[in-house]
Amino acid sequence: MKHTFITILLLFLSLTSFAHRSSEASHTFHISHGHYQVFNDTISKKTKIEVTYPNSSTVWTISEPAKIEWETINIASGKSIRFFLALNDMVVQELGTFKNSFSADDIVLAKNISTGNSYQVVGIELFPDNKYQIAKYATSYFSIRNPEADARKAAYEARNREKPTGVKAPTEKTIEPVTQFDGRNISYVEEVVFENEDITIEVWDHGRQDDDIVSIYLNGKTVISKHLLTYRRKQVTCTLEKGKPNDLFLYAHNLGKSPPNTVSIEITDGSTSKKIILNSDLKSCEAVKISVKQ
């Protein structure tokens, strides 16, 4: 009888322990399942941007307003997205910051954007809820045409191909224009002539102050070095070389807040004054040819 009671007691304890372990296992499963659900929700709320226009068949023209269209996932309509124009993986212009309304019209392109087929629009989510996961997107390559810049370039090249009339002095040399500096293309936008060789150059920010840093070169030599542009004019005096065109060009050290860098320049020789606007980015420089009247 005693052995029978012990056997029944052990059987009861075994069943109780099994039931307790089963309950713990069930509880553990529910906790694990809860963790999985939270993880799954986090994945499902991942933000995404896809720019649908421009695409690989798009051709923008500088003189016409541009348009961007996009789609998003898990980004509220009140959120903002910033867009940039890139050439060969380098930003050449900030296109603007827009609310997530899936399209933006009437975007003005910078006039110094050159004709090319390797442009991209890059979109970046601003102020994401998860700072470790920022949605961004780069389009496939598309084309931009700048007929005015192409016409200026063609006219300039045509002038250089023209043979001068008359007989040159034996010692006179043909001076080729500078077309590159520090790996950047130089494009001439204007030619000016002064009576005197001594000139004064003043530079200041054109438009709004946006932290542009620039240098000004005259015949390959620095006359203004790494200057932070403001509305206050920076003034220097220089001496032009007679008997040859003098190259004055703008060199950008950054893109500021609103690319490209745009500078107002006034050049005077004491009797004549000329105001010019030059643009520059990290791939190209605009320049002026200055001559002294013989």
Image (tube, grey):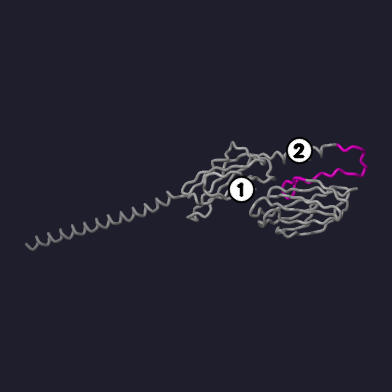
Return the x and y of residue 219 as percentages of the image width and height.
Answer: 81, 51
Q: Quadrant of residue 62?
A: top right
- Give residue 154's mark: 2
What is the quadrant of the N terminus in the image? Answer: bottom left
Determine the secondary structure under disc 1.
strand
Please tell me which residue lies in front, 51 or 63.
63
Q: Residue at x 25, y 57 (%)?
A: 23
Residue 267 lies left or right of residue 42; in this view the side is right
Q: Main secondary structure of the magenta part?
A: loop
Return the x and y of residue 10 as percentages of the image width and height.
Answer: 15, 60
Few, some or many residues within 10 Å of mark 1 (<14, 14–19, 20+)? many
Q: Is residue 232 located in the magenta-colored stretch of the structure?
A: no
Q: Is residue 164 located in the magenta-colored stretch of the structure?
A: yes
- Asked if the residue under mark 1 is in contact with the one under mark 2, i.e. CB atoms within 8 Å, the reply is no
Few, some or many residues within 10 Å of mark 2 (<14, 14–19, 20+)? few
Residue 13 lies left or right of residue 245; in this view the side is left
Q: Residue at x 58, y 48 (%)?
A: 83
Residue type pointed to by label 1: Leu
- Give residue 95's mark: 1
Q: Is residue 9 above or below residue 259?
A: below
Q: Residue at x 78, y 59 (%)?
A: 235
Residue type pointed to by label 2: Ala
Return the x and y of residue 191 as percentages of the image width and height.
Answer: 81, 46
Which segment did they paint magenta? 163-189
Return the x and y of residue 132 as percentages of the image width and height.
Answer: 49, 55
Which-is-in-front pick, marks 2 and 1? 1
Q: Is residue 85 above or below residue 162?
A: below
